[in-house]
Image: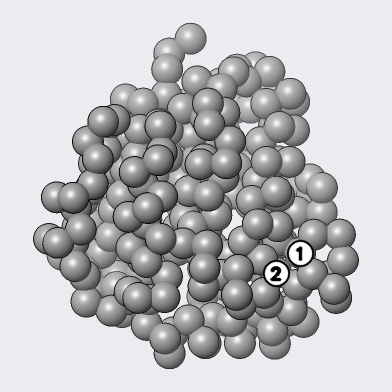
Amino acid sequence: MKRTSIAGMECDIFGCRKKNSPLILMIPGGSGKNYKDSNGNIFSGYQHLAEEFSLQGFTAVIVDTHGQGRSKKENGYSVPNAVNDVATLINYLKILYSISSERVGIWGRCGGGVVAMRYVLDNPGIISSIALWGVPYQMTNYYSPEQLSKSMKRLEEKGVKVDRESINQIWNFEDMVSNISCPLLFVRGLKDKYFLPDKASEILPTLSRGFLSVYILLSEFGHEVDNKHPYWELYVSIFADWFKCTIKER
């Protein structure tokens, strides 16, 4: 693993980093700040997953999207700013490693999944596929208000001014997914305590099936997953197999 800074964003790079090797950009959460969990402890599950991706031939890049634009004090954290961060990073990596668009995938978790989905919609044709883990169907309706407030407070305690309006308004899964034009994998753990009860049985049948899309709900998984989880290999295989199927060969 190599840690580097690109356009002010801290990135961990795993894998061979050879010319045009398949790339997976991993976005753990909105302004995750060194991938800390809700108790402030460093969480290594993202690194574990990136290591597994690298063992299967991918270059995996974990990024903390700072999402603060040019001025932290004036703009604060916002989803649009985080989307711009992702665009900057992907453009840089594609040039650095001479990667074509059909060789790039995005893995997004929680708030990082919101950013990933928004990036894909705003920049069609730039990546090959997207996989989401632990993302609410709709930020304001399905995300626990208490947990959302705690997440925003944690960012503000770190000195990050949060544009709460952009976070509440930016994400509506039903509307966004109907406009996406690349393969989409959506996976959730049924023991994820961050979210209100699922309405998947109501939502999923109404979504467009005009493209490759897979929706998986896992009964024994919560919001965070690392290599100590009893079904870790299943978790890894779901995402690795997805990207193997949807990122084109040379």
Relative placement, left or right, of 208 versus 171 is left
Q: Which mark is drawn over residue 38?
A: none
For disc 2, the marked residue is: 77
Q: Nearer the viewer, residue 201 or 242?
A: 201
Residue 17 position (above or below residue 202): above
Residue 77 position (above or below residue 161): above
Relative placement, left or right, of 80 versus 225 is right
**Element at badge 1?**
loop
Mark 2 Cα shell of 10 Å, populated few (<14), some (14-19), many (≥20): many
Residue drawn at the location 69% of the way across and 84% of the way down? 156
Colouring convention used in this rendered image of the protein: one colour
Give the Cα distance between marks 2 and 1.
5 Å
Labelled pair 2, 1 in contact (Cβ < 8 Å):
yes
Residue 88 lies, in percent from the top left, at 73, 41
Dot 1 amino acid type:
Gln
Q: Nearer the viewer, residue 52 or 208?
A: 208
For disc 1, the marked residue is: 68
Residue 191 lies, in percent from the top left, at 23, 73
Residue 184 lies, in percent from the top left, at 34, 39
Mark sitting earlier along the chain (2/1): 1
**Element at badge 2?**
loop
Looking at the rendering, which quadrant does residue 42 occupy? bottom right
Residue drawn at the location 53% of the way across and 31% of the way down? 124
Looking at the rendering, which quadrant does residue 87 occupy? top right
State whether residue 142 appears in this view: yes
Dot 2 amino acid type:
Tyr
Residue drawn at the location 50% of the way across and 20% of the way down? 102
